[in-house]
Image (cartoon, rainbow, N blue to C red):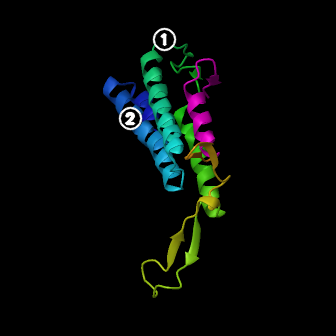
Amino acid sequence: MDGKVARWRKSTSILGQELDSMADLISFGVAPAVLGFACGLQTILDIFVLTFFVCCGAARLARYNATVSSLPKNSSGMITYYEGTPIPTSLLLVCALAFGVFSGRFWGFLEDQNQPYLPVSPFKIAFEESEIWGGKFNVFQNFFIHPFVFLYALNGALMVSRRLRIPKF
């Protein structure tokens, strides 16, 4: 929306561009990684991949800001393609997490029989490693990883790809 307003006003600024990138990094980089962590992707290798994902998002946005002036533009002054996938594609990860939570593949909500009814929350969260979508695999001795986290790795790698060119509509 901010880009449309800037084009409508026929004015842009470097500060606005950087603030937009920072907002995108938080909304589409940090937030999906935090949601993944909250859904149980909490092994040391999971955290490494989630950090990789956030760093790829930051690198993708930094590269875009640095190269936007040299990318080919159409007659209205808009770039014709993105190098790598745009960072908002991480919404697909958030949708997958939401579906997993909704279908019980990440969290289990059980009635707490030992506690009296609490008006705030009559449920307790029963979190078990076996409930995470795809389980977990032992990579090294005492180092586990959840297969679902590879979707984060794939999304991050696609964001920083220089060969992948996505047409901008």
Q: Which stretch appears magenta?
A: 147-169
Q: In this view of the protein, which residue sits in the foreground, 122 or 126?
A: 126
Instruction: Bin the neighbour count of mark 2 within 10 Å (Cα to Cα): few under 14, some 14-19, many 20 and up.
Output: some
Which amino acid does the dot numbered 2 rest on?
Met
User: Which residue is rendered at x = 43% and y = 37% of the image?
Assistant: 25
Judging from the image, what secondary structure is the residue with disc 2 in? helix
Residue 48 in view here: yes
Q: Nearer the viewer, mark 2 or mark 1?
A: 2
Instruction: Bin the neighbour count of mark 1 within 10 Å (Cα to Cα): few under 14, some 14-19, many 20 and up.
Output: few
User: Which residue is rendered at x = 50% and y = 18% of the image?
Assistant: 77
Give residue 47's position: percent from left, percent from top.
Answer: 49, 43
The residue where tag 2 is placed is: 22
Magenta-colored stretch includes residue 114: no
User: Label 2 to label 1, Cα distance in Å?
Assistant: 21 Å
Q: Residue furthest bottom?
A: 116
The residue where tag 1 is placed is: 70
Which amino acid does the dot numbered 1 rest on?
Ser
Give residue 120's position: percent from left, percent from top.
Answer: 42, 78
Residue 117 is marked as none
Q: Residue furthest left?
A: 15
Magenta-colored stretch includes residue 166: yes
